[in-house]
Image (tube, grey):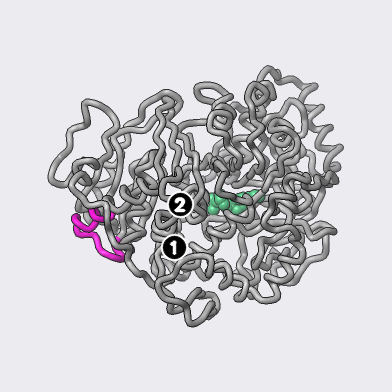
Amino acid sequence: MSENINTLLKESRVYQPSAQTKAAAYIQDYESAYKQSIADPEGFWSNVAKELEWFTAWTKVLEWNYPWAKWFVGATCNIAYNCLDRHVKTWRKNKVAIIWVGENDQERIITYGELYRQVNRCANGLKKLGLQKGDRVTIYLPKVPEQIVAMLACARIGVIHSVVYSGFSAPALANRIQDAEAKLVITADVGFDRGKVFNIKSVVDQAVANSPTVEHVVVLRRQTPGVTLATPKEIDWHDWLKAEKAVCEAEHLDAEHPLYILYTSGTTGKPKGVVHVHGGYMVGTYITTKYVFDLKDDDVYFCVADPGWVTGHSYIVYGPLLNGATILTAEGKPDYPNPGRWWDLIERYGVSIFYTTPTAIRLLMRYGEDWPKKYDLSTLRILGSVGEPINPEAWEWFHRATGENKPIMDTWWQTETGAIMITPLPTVPLKPGSATRAFLGIEADVVDSQGNSLPANTGGFAVIKKPWPAMMRTIYKDPERYKTYWNTIPNCYAAGDICHKDENGYLWFMGRADDVIKVAGNRLGTAEVESALVSHHAVAEAAVIGKPHKLVGESIKAFIILKQGEVESHALIQSIKDQVLKELGKIGVPSEIDIVSSLPKTRSGKIMRRVLKAKELGQDPGDISTIED
Ligand code: WT7
């Protein structure tokens, strides 16, 4: 941990905001807004909080008892109330909240008024099953509106939701149900994926068989005839709610009352249950959605995530609904039934804000630029990326394919941070591959293992220096594990990512600290080497690992996927190595390159390098419950 990380990649392109982007933006001058926010962070956050509704006001903005934070101390609020009641009291009552498109193109359009009624019915249904404030409910649903309804219904009455992505296996689900001691599981009969039907209910059956805390299972039946239910434990979603009233008072909750647990995988050991709370999380997701995406009432906002991941929690459900936005959410994959799927949805619904991932962009890149060209994408005005470093090659492609003049918000954050931390705002000049600067009120830095700030262009650890409202409050039932985030580097929250700042203070994420490769005394981040590999015209995707090497400590091994139509050859491998040599110099060139047809990824699209490494070295890969294949 003591040595710094070498930075090899030099990216010099800068994109200035267009006149149109500037004219629209809430934040005209990032520099002065940032300075002001940092001079008085508590003042900044409390002003943001005042844009929302509280049942009773706070007596203190922050109580910081290292590493434990309480925000908006003494206040009562309810995030679901702010997502719904605040809007149905206004003209937004009949504004579209959710446009949902099924994989088979089925369409459901739900207004704020209708969502409010559905959520209230569901909240009353939860009460009828005996659920009380503080109880846990596991939601294991495919991407259907009921997933959002169930989340908000829990929040409304102070029940803590634990959403589990519906691709998880029975043991992974059981583990999460048991850790949370959930009393209720909400699920569906089936989900759809690339034209195939997959049985969700049977996974739940297996998981629940070993989970004694579960009293009921609610099943959303999408197929006819419906699956048989083992009553009275199993209840049909519609039967459950048909007699319920559409009115249910929102619980007045302490600002620090837990909103949800979301399990995220650790490198080793069991998944961590990240806990977020009503008050601070509401403030953080609200303002980041508003400023980063410059969200306005006439926008149509499309985030491709699944609510089963934190991106879905913060930027499909809570952030956008807090802002009264119209959200498009679609079941299915970007290349089914064809690679025009998302472009088609953007054209059809006039999407103006589009938030996606580098993995998805690289997937669509493989099919070429003709696909986006077939569609009218002129309604788009702000783009977003999240989940991994976006390599400049993918950034440029995304920028070009969507019409050259739309700013890309490369948003860096984590399940643990709750909300976006490092990001451009639409008026900030962009450098492809950099997540640019800290969000307002956030103090970020790049430091060595002792917490000393590093000079420009020296790689080190990405840290956050002060608490922020949307930060996780603990790891469920494991406070010791929570403390490690704040104990690894003195006086900082250590994200576990490596990063460098350039001469303009722009941050460049270089991969996970766990994945750093050490070649002849040089410590390299995976992102730079992978980015250099992908800058070769024949390479679609790349992952690199370090392999023990007698002479140089570690040597670099690369796994790459070729673009459609490219054929493996000795000459091709050599030209790929030459490309890396040109981009990074000798030190970054992989000594081995394997051509593969797929890479191990999490279901949210992140490459699992440690799985590649374990396989290569014949070791145990650790927790692989989140792996896609
Ligand atoms: C890790 C957090 C945050 C929502 C989705 C993932 C990586 C995330 C970026 C970005 C470089 C990024 C980091 C981070 N990451 N966004 N824009 N640039 N790296 O949430 O599963 O909690 O993963 O994803 O390594 O630590 P998560």
Q: Residue at x 71, y 44 (%)?
A: 407
**Left or right relative to 442: residue 210:** left
Q: Nearer the viewer, residue 566 or 469?
A: 469
Q: Which quadrant holds the N terminus? A: bottom right
Q: Residue at x 36, y 56 (%)?
A: 161
**Residue annotated with mark 1:** 275
Tell me where the magenta segment starts and ends, as one range: 123-135
Q: Residue at x 72, y 36 (%)?
A: 399
Place of residue 576 in the rendered image (x, y in percent of width and height, measured from the top left): 78, 30
Three-letter amino acid code at the position of disc 2: Trp
Residue 526 is one of the magenta-drawn residues:
no
Place of residue 62 in the rendered image (x, y in percent of width and height, measured from the top left): 54, 77
**Left or right relative to 87: residue 8:** right
Graded by Cα atoms within 10 Å as few (under 14), some (14 to 19) or many (20 or more), the crowding at tag 1 reads many
Q: Nearer the viewer, residue 235 or 624?
A: 235
Three-letter amino acid code at the position of disc 1: Val
**Residue annotated with mark 2:** 91
